[in-house]
Image: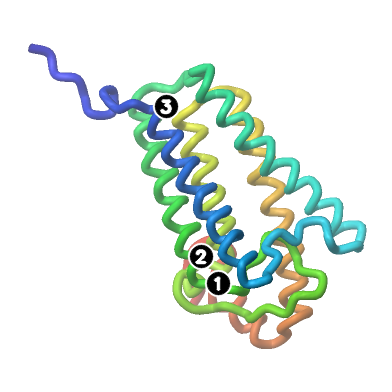
Amino acid sequence: MKTIPLEEALPCRVLALLVLVLFYGIYFGKAMVQKRKGIQTRQIGRRKERRIHTVELLMSAATLLAPAAQLLSLVLGWSRFPANARFTGFLLGLLGDGIFLASVLTMRDSWRAGIPDRDKTELVTSGIYTYSRNPAFLGFDLMCLGTFLLLGNWLTGLCSAFAILTLHLQILQEERFLEAAFGEPYRRYRAQTARYLGRKK
């Protein structure tokens, strides 16, 4: 009797849906909790500075296009990658979900999507932020890479790449904002902790 390798037996479309539901469930769940506290989580596009506004609008478009492409690929079953790549994608996607969850829990009420125009938040450097200055973005990137491998096709590839690029541009903007807002404490933190992952010597 022929044995089917584990990765080939897995229902990859269901696993891709699980990765997406977990990620967006965390995002919207946190936003709902903050809304009950009177906190506006989504701050994208509120700043009037042209560069910040443009990058945030691009990021907003990218983060809408990526899940739309992912869901379309799920419905139409467009996966073109071999089973072992899809299994790796599932593990990457789950890792991204876990990192994203740890980041929003650690940030508590300081978490925002976009650069706030009026809200005062704290500089968070503990927990997962000890090892990454941008774990929420890292989690999103890993989720996108994972779902791309799970749903491997040109549409998810392009939309994921566009989302990762615009989120990187957003990180660069947020770094300038954090330095202006927190000064020397942020500069010390930046000198010790990598932008995406790792401690500096």
User: Which residue is label 2 attached to?
Assistant: 103
Contact between labelled residues 3 and 1, with CB atoms less than 8 Å apart: no
Mark 1, other Cα within 10 Å: few <14 / some 14–19 / many ≥20: many
Q: Residue furthest bottom?
A: 184
Mark 2 surroundings within 10 Å by alpha-carbon count, few (fewer than 14), some (14 through 19), many (20 or more): many
The image shows residue 155 at horizontal and vertical percentages of 63, 25
Please report the residue visible at 48 percent of the width from the left and 42 percent of the height from the top: 21
Secondary structure beneath disc 2?
helix
Residue type, numbered disc 2: Ser
Pointer 1 or 3: first along the chain: 3
- The alpha-carbon separation of the residues under discs 2 and 3 comes to 27 Å
Give the residue type that dot 3 points to: Arg
**Looking at the image, residue 153 lies above or below residue 183:** above
Q: Position of residue 174 (x, y in %)?
A: 72, 66
Q: Nearer the viewer, residue 133 or 62?
A: 62
Numbered badge on residue 107: 1
Would residue 84 be found to the left or right of residue 114 on screen? left
Outermost residue, top direction? 1
In the picture of the structure, the residue carrying the numbered disc 3 is 13
Work out how far the residue at label 1 is from the one at label 3, CA to CA, in angstroms: 32 Å
Q: Are marks 2 and 1 in contact (CB under 8 Å)?
A: yes
* Disc 1 residue type (three-letter): Met
Residue 147 image offset from top left, x and y in percent:
49, 36
- Among all residues in the image, which is located at the extreme front? 36
Q: Residue at x 55, y 50 (%)?
A: 140
